Structures are given as C-alpha cells and as structure tokens.
Image (spheres, rainbow, N blue to C red):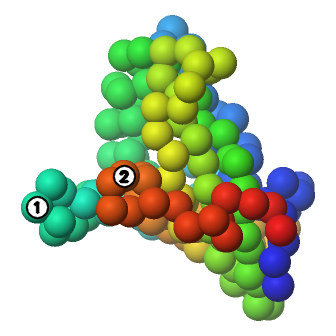
Amino acid sequence: MNQSNSGPEWPLLRLYELISGPADKKRIWDDVRPLFLEGARLRMVVRLEDGTEKMHEWTLDEFTRDAGEFYKQDGFWETEIASRAERFGSIAHVFSTYESRVKDPGGPPAMRGINSVQLIRGKDRWLIASIVFQTEQEGVPIPPEYLSRD
C-alpha cells in the first residue's frame, strides 16, 4: 500500500518541523521524544571514498545531543520531497526522501537523501521505532521512483 507521508497519521513531517530552523532557534527535544518508541535507534549509512560503507548509530538522546550541536552552527532545514509507505496491521515502513538546507532555508539543498522509517502503531498514534538514513552522493543517487509522490 503506497500512502503519502503527509497525512496526519505519520509523525515524520512533525519531526522535520521540529528539527528545522535557524542556528539561534532552540530545538525543543521534549517535543521530539514523544514521536519515538522507547529504545528507538537512529542509524546513518555513509559511503566512504574507497567505496566501503560505515554505519553510525545513536540512541535518541545521543542523536539529540549531536544533532543539536550541529544545528546550532549554521541552522538546518529538512523537508520531505517525496514518500512511499507500506503498512500491515500495526506496523509500517516509510521511505521519506528529503532535502536539507544549511544557513538559508530558501537556498539550494546542501544534501538530499532517504530516511527509511519503521513505525509501530501505539494505543492512539504511530511511533517511530527506528530511522536509517543515507545521503545521496556520487555512486549512490536517489532512484527516480523515490523522487515522486506517485
């Protein structure tokens, strides 16, 4: 089942909104935490110059600490440009294609990538169980099917 991430059910657009803003905007991490399942992990896959890949992993607390420092430097804005979702019962997976901007929210994207988000339906809402993300780079382009909302 393909479903847009822009509906009220998915917490991803709220997450993008909460992490985005100028360098002097204090991120309210207490508003981010309820979007995640307890014990959630965030992982980033990076392709190195030699073609090997490395994974960085954070707990939510570690991520908010590290990202918070990064966001303070120049400001950071992340927006979804496309998404594809599949759902079965109380589990869902969303590929959320994003663009990130640094210093100027209206400037050209500094990077693009895909967030692979696993969700579990709680009592009354969807919670993020994990996010694995990778930025687009030479040798790892975003496939066309993940750049449209079809």
Q: How many marks overall? A: 2
User: Residue 23 location, x and y as percent?
Assistant: 48, 13
Q: Is residue 43 in sight in this rendering?
A: no
Q: In this view, does 82 lie to the left or right of 57?
A: right
Residue at point 36%, 16% (across, down): 73
User: Residue 93 location, x and y as percent?
Assistant: 65, 76
Residue at point 38%, 62% (across, down): 140
Q: Residue furthest right?
A: 7
Helix, strand or loop at mark 1: loop
Residue at point 48%, 23% (across, down): 102
Mark 1 Cα within 10 Å, few/some/many (few <14, many 20+)?
A: few
Mark 2 and mark 1 residues within 8 Å of each other at the beta carbon: no
Mark 2 Cα within 10 Å, few/some/many (few <14, many 20+)?
A: some
Q: Is residue 82 left or right of residue 52?
A: right
Disc 2 and disc 1: Cα gap in Å? Answer: 13 Å
On the rendered image, what quadrant is the N terminus found in? bottom right
140 versus 87 height, above or below: above
98 versus 115 height, above or below: above
On the rendered image, what quadrant is the C terminus found in? bottom right
Nearest the viewer among 67 and 104 is 104
Nearest the viewer among 48 and 124 is 48
In the picture of the structure, the residue carrying the numbered disc 1 is 50
As shown in the figure, which amino acid type bears the numbered disc 1?
Answer: Asp
Q: In this view, does 131 lie to the left or right of 9?
A: left
Of the image marks 2 and 1, the number of the one nearer the N terminus: 1
In the picture of the structure, the residue carrying the numbered disc 2 is 137
Nearest the viewer among 48 and 11 is 48
Q: In which quarter of the image is residue 126?
A: bottom right
User: Residue 117 location, x and y as percent?
Assistant: 58, 67
As shown in the figure, which amino acid type bears the numbered disc 2?
Answer: Gln
Q: Quadrant of residue 43?
A: bottom left
43 versus 101 height, above or below: below
